[in-house]
């Protein structure tokens, strides 16, 4: 029997077969096992060759970037990637080399790079009417608003269009303050909600906050099952929300804002049952509940269309951006008719919010998600990829945690599993090596030690195997 198994292992070398064998034969993460000789993985075939690139070199672009763009801009990799073309889940550099894009423009390219249906919608609308104003009628904005409302529960059906997630969250926070007559807002530590005046206050990571006036926001303990002091005990975390209300406010609050899965914070999925408990406490204090769906929305979690649905709650306000337009600058705030009335107290207007080209792209995105069953694919492929990543966690001590849902996954690297010491240097090395193999991933978390895996929802199992094999190969050589 042992000889038969050995023969099979020597003959069948596909990524899926290696994965299944590793899952069936449980082995400890020992040095002996890490000596297993792995070959560099082969990228899945794809029927597209970009046209030759004839533009300026990466060095020329970098020189102009350093001279004319903000010094706050940073880049990944020792040698910055020069991207000139994209098609579905793949990107191409100036030499024509193809990469599996597992970062998706930071969870922004949901349907795939240059998806033909989205591109066609943008081109056709641009030919007819590029911009006018919402002071005139146009059916595209109303068609898209209706499409969004049809995907939301309860009475969430009034849409305000913006240009970004930061703008959407700023507007949501203002609406909550106007509606309740209160100023205090509660957000979660480790959360990220934008870099505007109000949203920077709601953001709770010092690396994203400047030393400017930020008032009226209290930061509750993060219900982080991996690093949190209470593990996955949602009730204990929720009690701190009540303590903040009791001891940090007048007893009433304007709102509670949170992501269901923290994106910039390192793909932290909140402890199960936390949002129902927190929402109940906040509503008793007269506050509204805001769901930040900028990264988790639009079918990315696979199991549901919106991230908050994974916690079984219905918010009062939902904010969204990123995947909403597949890369087009677009965001939105959706709330109830009653709450929406507060903006009629004064004039409220957004010049580009609801632009016909942007909303045409958004409507095309909704149709592509439905037509190509991208939510189902996100669930199926995302679940498969998470299993593969968990298999690597069993194999390598450097991987401390694998978490997330669908196409919103995180892999946290630590040099000591017990102390959970962030592997800051190691993650940079692995990212660079994976890029050389043809895989692009992001990183995040407060310590910068979490791989953020956020591919387009058209990602396939073959792509998932290639990513996991590239990570396996890189880790095996450390």
Image (tube, grey):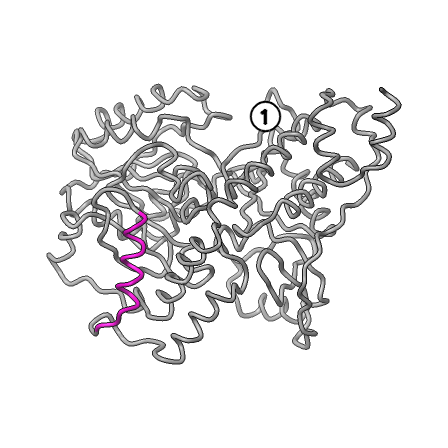
Residue at 42% of width from left, 31% of height from top?
Answer: 270
| Left or right, residue 78 beside residue 343 | right
Pick the front one: 441 or 216: 441
Q: Which quarter of the figure has residue 355?
A: bottom left
Q: Which residue is mark 1?
A: 420
Residue at 82% of width from left, 42% of height from top?
Answer: 39
**Residue 240 pos. (x, y %):** 31, 23
**Residue 2 pos. (x, y %):** 85, 20
- Residue extending farthest left: 345
Pick the front one: 341 or 307: 307
Secondary structure of residue under mark 1 = loop
Q: Which residues are magenta?
A: 137-151
| Left or right, residue 464 beside residue 218 | right
**Residue 77 pos. (x, y %):** 66, 52
Residue at 30% of width from left, 64% of height from top?
Answer: 353
Pick the front one: 217 or 322: 322
Vertical side of 120 occupied by 324: above or below: above
Circle count: 1
Residue 146 is a magenta residue: yes
**Residue 214 pos. (x, y %):** 31, 45
Vertical side of 402 occupied by 408: above or below: below
């Amino acid at each position: 029997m042992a000889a038969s198994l050995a023969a099979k292992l020597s003959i069948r070398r596909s990524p899926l077969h290696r994965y299944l064998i590793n899952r069936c034969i449980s082995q400890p993460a020992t040095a002996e096992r890490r000596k297993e000789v792995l070959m560099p993985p082969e990228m899945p075939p794809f029927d597209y060759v970009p046209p030759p690139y004839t533009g300026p070199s990466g060095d020329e672009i970098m020189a102009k970037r350093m001279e004319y763009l903000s010094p706050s801009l940073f880049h990944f990799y020792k040698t910055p990637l020069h991207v000139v073309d994209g098609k579905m889940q793949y990107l191409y550099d100036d030499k024509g080399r193809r990469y599996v894009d597992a970062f998706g423009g930071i969870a922004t390219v949901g349907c795939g790079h240059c998806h033909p249906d989205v591109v066609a919608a943008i081109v056709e609308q641009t030919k007819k009417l590029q911009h006018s104003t919402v002071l005139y009628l146009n059916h595209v904005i109303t068609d898209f608003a209706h499409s969004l409302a049809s995907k939301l529960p309860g009475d969430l059906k009034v849409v305000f269009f913006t240009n970004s997630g930061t703008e959407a969250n700023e507007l949501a926070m203002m609406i909550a303050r106007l509606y309740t007559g209160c100023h205090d807002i509660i957000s979660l530590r480790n959360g990220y909600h934008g870099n505007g005046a109000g949203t920077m206050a709601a953001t709770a990571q010092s690396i994203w906050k400047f030393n400017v006036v930020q008032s009226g926001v209290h930061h509750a303990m993060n219900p982080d099952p991996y690093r949190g002091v209470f593990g996955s005990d949602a009730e204990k975390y929720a009690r701190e929300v009540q303590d903040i209300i009791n001891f940090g406010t007048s007893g009433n609050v304007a709102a509670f804002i949170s992501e269901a899965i923290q994106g910039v914070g390192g793909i932290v999925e909140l402890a199960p049952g936390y949002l129902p408990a927190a929402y109940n406490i906040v509503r008793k204090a007269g506050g509204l509940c805001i769901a930040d769906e900028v990264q988790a929305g639009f079918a990315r979690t696979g199991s549901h269309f919106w991230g908050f649905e994974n916690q079984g709650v219905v918010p009062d306000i939902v904010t969204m951006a990123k995947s909403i337009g597949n890369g087009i600058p677009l965001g939105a705030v959706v709330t109830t008719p009653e709450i929406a009335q507060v903006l009629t107290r004064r004039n409220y207007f957004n010049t580009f919010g609801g632009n016909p080209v942007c909303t045409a792209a958004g409507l095309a995105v909704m149709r592509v998600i439905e037509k190509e069953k991208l939510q189902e694919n996100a669930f199926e492929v995302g679940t498969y990829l998470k299993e593969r990543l968990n298999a690597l966690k069993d194999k390598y001590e450097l991987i401390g945690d694998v978490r997330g849902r669908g196409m919103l996954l995180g892999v946290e690297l630590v040099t000591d599993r017990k102390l959970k010491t962030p592997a800051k240097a190691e993650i940079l090395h692995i990212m660079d090596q994976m890029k050389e193999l043809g895989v692009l991933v992001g990183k995040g978390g407060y310590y910068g030690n979490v791989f953020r895996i956020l591919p387009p929802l058209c990602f396939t199992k073959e792509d998932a195997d290639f990513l996991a094999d590239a990570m396996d190969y890189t880790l095996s050589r450390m």
